[in-house]
Image: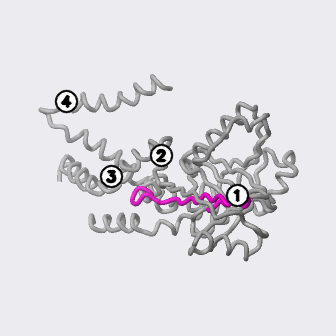
Amino acid sequence: MKWRRWNYVLHRDIGFLCIGLTLLYAISGVAVNHISQWNPSYRVERVETNIGPVLGNPSDAETVRTILARLNEQGKLESSYRPDRHSLQLFVEGRSIMIDLTSGHVVHDRAIPRPGLREMNFLHLNHPKKAWTWLADLYAVALAFLAISGLFMIRRKTLRRGLVLTGVGILLPLLFLIVYL
Amino acid sequence: MRIFLMTILLVAMLSPATTFAKDFGQGLTLTEETAISSIIDNPEAYVGKKVKVSGLVIDVCSTRGCWVYLAGDRDFEKIRIKVTDGEIVSPMEARGKKATVEGVVESMELTREDVIKRRKHHAEETGTSFDPATVTSGETVLRIRGLGAEISGL
């Protein structure tokens, strides 16, 4: 098989392999790019309520049970923290419940994962590390191969257009570097 | 060949993400643990030094996951763990879980304006209200520049 044929076959097959990862990195890339405007992985839901003043020792299990009962909270209590003398923070199944013991004001925070996006960002930001790092490196090498092998697939009749567009693609980041760096 | 590679890719993508989710950043290297109360009581002895601390994660930056607060070993105490944006992103599920963190202790002298700016930013991140009039002076802020962490129960 001639090298051009090999180039075509490898470009095509590696291209197929990269479709899933490219979509993952593209979608997550847009989401993460705008991290200053939103949390790309979670939506935080906040509910405020009042259960009335809480009497008794907040470190006491009975007092905590009373608070949870007033909140009609059915979830399992995981841990608690005393931010100050007048407050108690309870953690129930990943949720945070902050109680002002004097006024009874309660702020209930729940972080709801954005389905799909959280998982994509998890991979994009290389949280898994370990084997995923290698896979992501392989993907980067594959992308570099696709870019270079693509250059050798330009046909004579589209050579000029191919070179111009390739040049634009290289110049664009350079232009931004000149402006912003 | 292609089917084989596709299978590996799919398995890697569909593996339960949480099985890897415990370690963050550079991981843990120190053997000795320092109590958060020791750092708060005697910051001069720790500033610039690498320490390993552990405690309950009581709050996480809800936008970038770029900081967490660890509860101290005494009531009413906590310490902020700041990580470089993007290097470590703390998940919000970490709230209420026990974390062991390694990092360098930092102390920062803030002016009143700095304090207002930081608290305003914090209020925006946490969706809480903040009145600048409550800040009357500058302050010294103690924090740990987080390098690695392990969060159990994720």
**Magenta stretch?**
A97-118
Q: Quadrant of the C terminus of chain B?
A: bottom right
> Does label 2 or label 1 sit earlier along the sequence?
2
Seen in the picture, residue A21 relative to A170 is either above or below; the reply is below
In depth, the one of B6 and B85 nearer the eye is: B85
Q: Secondary structure at mark 2?
A: loop
Tags 2 and 4 on a common chain: yes
Residue B22 figure quarter: bottom right
Q: Which mark is in front, 2 or 3?
A: 2
Q: Do the CB atoms of the residues marked 1 and 3 lie less than 8 Å apart?
A: no
> Does label 1 or label 4 sit earlier along the sequence?
1
Q: Secondary structure at mark 4?
A: helix
Amino acid carrying label 4: it is Arg
Amino acid carrying label 3: it is Leu
Which labelled disc corresponds to residue A73? none
Q: Which residue is mark 1?
A: A103
Q: Secondary structure at mark 3?
A: helix
